[in-house]
Amino acid sequence: MQRRLLFVSESKNFLVNAMIKNLENAGFEVVTSQPDMVEIQLIENIPDIYIVYLEGDLNGFNGTLKYLKKLVTEEGKDRVLYLIGSQLEVNAAYEVIPKSVVSASFNRPVNMQDVIARLNILIVDDEETGGRKRILVVDDDSIMLRSMNNWLSKKYEVYMANSGLNAISLLSKTHVDLILLDYEMPVASGLQVFEMLKSENSTKNIPVIFLTAKDDKETVMKVLAAKPEKYLLKTMEPEALVKSVDDFFKGK
């Protein structure tokens, strides 16, 4: 995600200008708009991060909130929506759009450092990663995790989780470009984790490739029925497995 965001507010008072200045000082390019759906639609190259500062007549925000919901839930897009306002104003917004669409809300008086810290989690900093894609490997087998890290880390930024719950916790703080998910895990199976990921707006568009140790017809049919991007056998030679990942990204 780029350091570019849309800040929606009814007016540009001293407080709003101070918040925008804080964001700009933190390295963000801030595009501003009133809560006007037409004005937002006319923005060229609209950002993927939206902050709505709720104030005044909240009825005036309803059309904008519904439009931003449409953008955030658009298939194949990775976008986020934040709300700033009193608890009553935020609750009123949730009557217009589902709470699940909003990545975070901040109550006034807001600490902009908290907002900026949350925003920074979203940003893939090319200078730090060398422009490399980020891959999360999820497997309860620690030996497999270490092996996958060794094979993939020469080309990719690799993150590891030894359970589905740990993976979901990590994804709440870290953006990744691909998830390699063990199909057979205790407590929460790979299929259950996959379903959880697809049910959340923040993770539903992250591509998932299943890892499986079995290649019998029954297992393969179960894996494919979930409709992941593809599946890879754990028994593959390391070079072939890495090439499969390379080929996946080449096709994007």
Image (cartoon, helix red, strand yellow):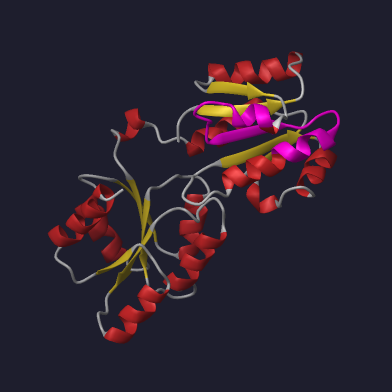
Q: In the rendered image, which quarter is residue 229 located in?
A: bottom left
Q: In the rendered image, which quarter is residue 92 located in?
A: top right
Residue 235 location (% of width, % of height): 19, 72
Q: Residue at coordinates 64% horizontally, 40% vertically from top-left? A: 68
Q: Nearer the viewer, residue 143 or 84?
A: 84
Residue 149 colored magenta? no
Residue 178 location (% of width, % of height): 36, 53
Question: Relative to residue 242, is residue 119 depicted above or below?
Answer: above
Q: Residue at coordinates 85% horizontally, 28% vertically from top-left? A: 56
Q: Residue at coordinates 71% horizontally, 40% vertically from top-left? A: 65
* Residue 169 appears in the rendering: yes
Q: What stretch is highlighted in magenta?
A: 38-64
Q: Which of 98 and 183 is in front in this view?
A: 98
Residue 37 location (% of width, % of height): 68, 33
Q: Residue at coordinates 72% horizontally, 26% vertically from top-left? A: 9
Question: Relative to residue 61, is residue 150 depicted above or below?
Answer: below
- Answer with left or right where residue 231 lies relative to residue 100: left
* Residue 106 appears in the rendering: no
Outermost residue toward the top in this view: 14
